[in-house]
Image (cartoon, rainbow, N blue to C red):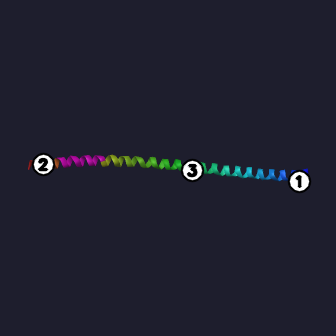
């Protein structure tokens, strides 16, 4: 009877060891995925910061053109009112 219980406990222990091994392997995979995602995020942020500068320049240029357009419209209105 004790031998049978011992066999069952050994089998259960072996199963638990296998589960632990599987959990450890899964953890390694998750850590690898996390590192990969962090790298992708860093690259995306780098690309974003590189794209922000030209966008800021274009926005400033657009604002300057809009101000110039308003000035020209004002001049045109003044010229029309003089005639």
Contact between marks 1 and 3 (CB within 8 A): the answer is no
Labels 2 & 3 near each other (Cβ < 8 A): no
Q: Main secondary structure of the magenta part?
A: helix
Provide residue 5's location: percent of width, then percent of height. 87, 51
Question: In percent of the image, x 30 and y 47: which residue is there?
Answer: 63
**Which of the numbered marks, if any, corresponds to residue 25?**
none
Q: Is residue 72 left or right of residue 11?
A: left
Q: Earlier in the sequence, mark 1 or mark 3?
A: 1
Name the mark nearer the viewer: 1 or 3. 1
Residue 81 picture location, percent across and down: 11, 48
Q: Earlier in the sequence, mark 2 or mark 3?
A: 3
43 or 73, which lies in front?
Answer: 73
The answer to whether residue 1 is magenta is no
Q: CA distance from mark 2 to mark 3?
A: 61 Å
Furthest-front residue in view? 1
Q: Which residues are magenta?
A: 63-74
Residue that badge 1 annotates: 4
Q: Element type at marker 1?
A: helix
The reply to whether the C-beta atoms of the residues labelled 1 and 2 are less than 8 Å apart is no
Residue where numbered disc 2 is placed: 79
- Residue 3, percent across and down? 90, 52
Residue 51 in the image: x percent, y percent?
Answer: 43, 49
Q: Residue at x 15, y 49 (%)?
A: 77
Q: Answer whether residue 73 is magenta in the image.
A: yes
Residue at image coords 67%, 49%: 27
Q: Which residue is mark 3?
A: 37
């Amino acid at each position: 009877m004790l031998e049978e219980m011992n066999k069952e406990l050994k089998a259960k222990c072996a199963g638990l060891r296998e589960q632990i091994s599987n959990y450890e392997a899964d953890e390694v995979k998750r850590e690898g995925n996390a590192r990969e995602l962090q790298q992708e995020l860093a690259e995306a942020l780098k690309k974003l910061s590189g794209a922000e500068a030209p966008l800021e320049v274009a926005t400033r240029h657009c604002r300057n053109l809009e101000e110039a357009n308003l000035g020209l419209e004002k001049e045109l209105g003044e010229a029309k009112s003089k005639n």
